[in-house]
Image (tube, rainbow, N blue to C red):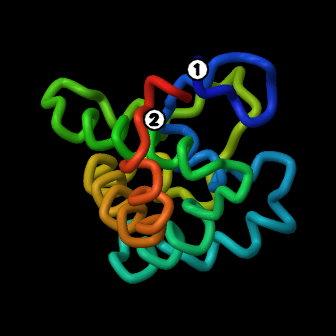
Amino acid sequence: MMLMHPFINEEFVPDLTWFIGQFDVYDREETLGAILEVYNPENKRDRSELIVKYGLNLECLSYRHKYVLVRFLGDKLNDPDFDFKSLFEIDEDCAGSWPRGEWYNLQSPKEFLQDVYVLAKETWKEDLKKAALEDPSTW
């Protein structure tokens, strides 16, 4: 068995863009962009609110998906060679944009994801506990 992607009939492969993709405002500058531009991702309080209110608002994911994503993020945070800055880079040819200039040059992208990790473990605590009681090989 395998954990399936929530939208397509393929195996779910964890990706950190699940945690930051909700902040992409391309083609939504006047709606989501207007809401998010008041937050500064460099400000600890703003960042916490952004993450909890928007970044972790992933109702499409099951408790199993959340568990896999949090474990994946934990592994990446422990990898000294992982390039967190690249997650926030948007190619010129890519349809994507951040709500404010600070997003393009975060002082510490890893710190942003460390906050995501801590807040995800807190916000999704019950889901993570439930998944931890199961054998992932049966998914």
The answer to whether 46 is drawn above or below residue 137 in the figure is below
Give the labeled residue for mark 1.
2
The quarter holding residue 36 reads bottom right
Under mark 2, the amino acid is: Leu
Image quarter of the N terminus: top right
- Look at the numbered disc 1 and give the secondary structure of its residue: loop
Residue 60 placement (x, y as % from top left): 73, 51
Under mark 1, the amino acid is: Met
Nearest the camera: 82 or 134?
A: 134
Residue at image point 54% right, 44% down: 64
Q: In this view, does 2 lie to the left or right of 85?
A: right
- Whichever of labels 1 and 2 marks the residue nearer the N terminus, that label is 1
Residue at image point 16% right, 37% down: 78
Image quarter of the C terminus: top right
Nearest the camera: 2 or 27?
A: 2
Q: In this view, does 112 lie to the left or right of 102?
A: left
